[in-house]
Image (cartoon, rainbow, N blue to C red):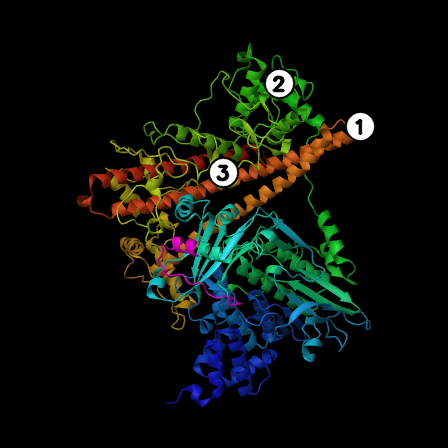
Amino acid sequence: MASPTSINPAHAHFESVLQAQLCQDVLSSFQGLCRALGLEPGGGLPQYHKIKAQLNYWSAKSLWAKLDKRASQPVYQQGRACTGTKCLVVGAGPCGLRAAVELAMLGARVVLVEKRTKFSRHNVLHLWPFTIHDLRALGAKKFYGRFCTGSLDHISIRQLQLLLLKVALLLGVEIHWGVTFTGLQPPPRKGAPSDFHTPSAPGSGWRAQLQPSPPAQLANYEFDVLISAAGGKFVPEGFTVREMRGKLAIGITANFVNGRTVEETQVPEISGVARIYNQSFFQSLLKATGIDLENIVYYKDDTHYFVMTAKKQCLLRLGVLRQDWPETDRLLGSANVAPEALQRFARAAANFATHGKLGKLEFAQDAHGRPDVSAFDFTSMMRAESSARVQEKHGARLLLGLVGDCLVEPFWPLGTGVARGFLAAFDAAWMVKRWAEGAGPLEVLAERESLYQLLSQTSPENMHRNVAQYGLDPASRYPNLNLRAVTPSQVRDLYDVEAKEPVQRMSDKTDSRKPATGSVATQEELLHWCQEQTAGYPGVHVTDLSSSWADGLALCALVHRLRPGLLEPSELQGVGALEATSWALKMAEHELGITPVLSAQAMVAGNDPLGLIAYLSHFHSAFKSTPHNPGPVSQGSPGTASAVLFLGKLQRTLQRTRAQVEAETPSTEEPPVPEPDVPVTPPSQYQEASAEDLCALCGEHLYILERLCANGRFFHRSCFRCHICEATLWPSGYGQHPGDGHFYCLQHLPQPGHKEDSSDRGPESQDLPTHSENNMPSRPSIPGAPQEGTTPVPSQPTRQLIRLSSPERQRLSSLHLTPDPEMEAPPKPPRSCSVLARQALEGSFVGWGMPVQSPQVLVAVEKEEEESPCSSDEEAEEDVPLDSDTEQVLWNLAKNSGTMNSYPTWRRTLLRRAKEEEMKRFCKAQAIQRRQNEIEAALRELEAKGMELELALRSRSSSPEQQKALWLEQLLQLVQKKNSLVAEEAELMITVQELNLEEKQWQLDQELRTYMNREETLKTAADRQAEDQVLRKLVDVVNQRDALIRFQEERRLSELASGPGPQG
């Protein structure tokens, strides 16, 4: 029997469209299809219906069924919702094509212009669950058979563009290639304003300015809607863009040829690993290759795609960057980047991350035929202040909308680009539908801006769970939707009747919308508050903010009021001013989280009144909401359980642990965070720097807002960096080496008794935190250096088994970051460490970021998988190869749950869920890192402003007192902003600690499995000793996570006790 393609030539053209893998092949095949059917391309939905009517064989019918199902949704009104609306879409990126598809389904006439002539971007995009479902509903599996098979959740940009291009062509979108949009051509002066969006008469509408000279049909095309998806570097005139800036961030992307060999398919992907929670991997990478990274991701698609964030000093050291320049454009310009060195850098990083299992890495070719590897800057990201505008000129209205990178440039490590880009495309199409329905311009703009406010907050967790119901209607996607969050009166500046200086008006409006800085205490209010807090203490008389504090008694009284029990006022009799002040400064830092701004010597001498005012203002901002009572403040008062205080205690705990490393291993029952009892008598040995106005590292002058205190010395924040990698040192993330006195990040902090050659392992022996990789060493080994924050384990054999209480066993087997009020009773205490560990591993699946699945849950999961569209014959998912150890773990889990034979999809489901958890953790870490960089940039700006104000206040000028008071108030305002940013930074570091401990538990969990999978009779004495040491580390991680739980609980109770209000 003859095949359909031999009977009807159009069938062959259609199959060529489905299978084409190059942009030009798609276009030529589609043009051949249209010629064979007697149609003109770009005919809108009528063209689609004609193609469907003539191509009715089985292969085509399966695609028509999917597209018809989407088009049958009521919101499209059978393709008549936007009849008569003419749209121009600029840019054939994924977001521009997705917007064009939606507009075509609404029945609008859609013309798309693209300056490129081919799709050549191999970079891979992470897909949220709803984007996967959305693309499958458009027939993605028909165009690209490997689309999201198994647990894959990504696609290359090129493949995504190809499949969306095919859908757009079939739906009648008119596409012009090699055409650059340069601007708008307003209509001529004729006609009158109209209250309705009726099609304009010929020659009276808006047109596009295009280069090079377009064909007459395109040059004369008049439209009433413009959707810009041309990328972050092109935003139509009239829109204001805001820059979100952090510190220097250099990304490197590399694409290697994917030969699709058996060996290559067995190499697991890396959904993301970040230095924030896995410093050991990056330390090993640095030792083995000299490469210093912040993160790395590996996806397998058309190419082997790697993306990583590299440190500038590393790139300079390895010759990737020829010279250091302060300007980013010059630093990463083609003249300053050595191509060969960049290729060596990317190849070495990729080879290490994959354990060399990809073989010889050959670069794929980019659009210019060069190796596809590049360095890019994502220090700053642009975000449009508004998502839409309306311009009206000479009676013709034009609706302008932004989607994709020209709306919001995504932060690549978060994997939000294409997901939020699709959401913006849906929202823009909904806006066009409302426009076509005759809604007023201000009403349309207000609804669009209300949706735009939700965009940056969206994540898979806070959107509707049922992705199958997602559609054009925003209510189907956003759970807490309020289309009136922005009122029409608030968007009047987005409606330009004659478009006179729109950019200036937007800038003015943007400035007027900036929130007030909040209440900042004046000098008089600060003095009055200090007098209230120190009233009633013998010998304390606060009359000013300078000399009244010289004897140290006033500061001791203030500390005692806020933290009673440290010292009785009577015990200060006979204590010198310097000694009392030193003690009060130390207690304020250790017990209240108030870091010093000036030294005890300066406070006693009274030679830094501005520093003293700034220091006391920190007390006021942290404790101003505390009611004044005759007695001392309770320990549950707000501000006392701050993240700054917690991290300070954690930092000192780490220092004490290092000091005790030569002693015997401390008991595991002792929590690592709480400090020893505070001495009752002020220690006279407390040493401080006598000159806080000079940086202890560079010796340059220190202004008030620049001062950072660590270990009793003052530094510039910009100077307080790791001695090796020059990375900024974060709270609780650094250590000082007692030998050389330098500060190091925890990754580069020299370990006492550490032998470099013992842990300098190559890529073949490194543990990589990916779920499907063989992490198990061939023979049990103990890491050469202790992990960050854990109690170091001595090299000599341990002689005593760990004795754990019953609650500890329960926490070890099922650990959560927050207390569970419905926790089940602890199990019966096991007899040995081996039994305990085995019980913990069998009772949890912590290493994969998931709790144990009950049979009922697995039944539901199985049912969900069977009912999903991907279970059909056409979209049957491929099995993802698993290494033996990972498969054995999953096998044991299914066997123990009794689900191995009954529910065969457990393998794919568990792996997909595990990858989702890994991706969530990676995205969380990258969001923290980005915010840390933004805080650092904001602090630099505050320091510059504070320096100007401080110079003005300290100069002996003849400025009036009223002006000086205003300057002082502005300085205190900056101090409050700085304290707020530092507190937020500390909160982020708490989350970093959580991620760190999660990663450590996962690694220890994996290491422990290697011993537990062995028969007891085959274990040697060394194996049992190593197993006990791993278990000790696991218990230590439990203790540290318990400390975090206690801190969070104390803060929660403190907030409940204090009620709503500003917190320190």
Numbered disc in front, either 1 or 2? 1
The location of residue 627, given as percent across then percent down, is 61, 27
The location of residue 263, given as percent across then percent down, is 33, 63
Q: In the rendered image, which quarter contains the C terminus?
A: top right
Classify 10 Å Cα crowding around label 3: few (below 14), some (14-19), many (20 and above): many
Query: As drawn, is 883 to the left or to the right of 1056?
Result: left
The location of residue 375, given as percent across then percent down, is 53, 56
Residue drawn 79% across and 63% down?
498
Number of numbered discs: 3
Q: Is residue 464 visible?
A: no
Q: Is residue 993 visible?
A: yes
Q: Residue 571 carries which label?
A: none
Q: What residue did someone put label 2 on?
A: 604
Classify 10 Å Cα crowding around label 2: few (below 14), some (14-19), many (20 and above): many
Q: In the rendered image, which quarter contains the N terminus?
A: bottom left
N-term mark: 1 or 2: 2
Between the residue at mark 1 and the residue at mark 2, the CA separation in whole angstroms equals: 28 Å
Q: What residue did someone put label 3 on?
A: 722
Tell me the element at label 2: helix
| Residue stretch in magenta | 347-369
Relative to 65, residue 586 above or below: above
Residue drawn 56% across and 39% down?
984
Query: As drawn, is 356 to the left or to the right of 682?
Result: left
366 and 590: which is toward the camera: 366
N-term mark: 3 or 1: 3
135 and 473: which is toward the camera: 135
Between the residue at mark 3 and the residue at mark 2, the CA separation in whole angstroms equals: 33 Å
Q: Residue 958 carries which label?
A: 1
Label 1 amino acid? Ser
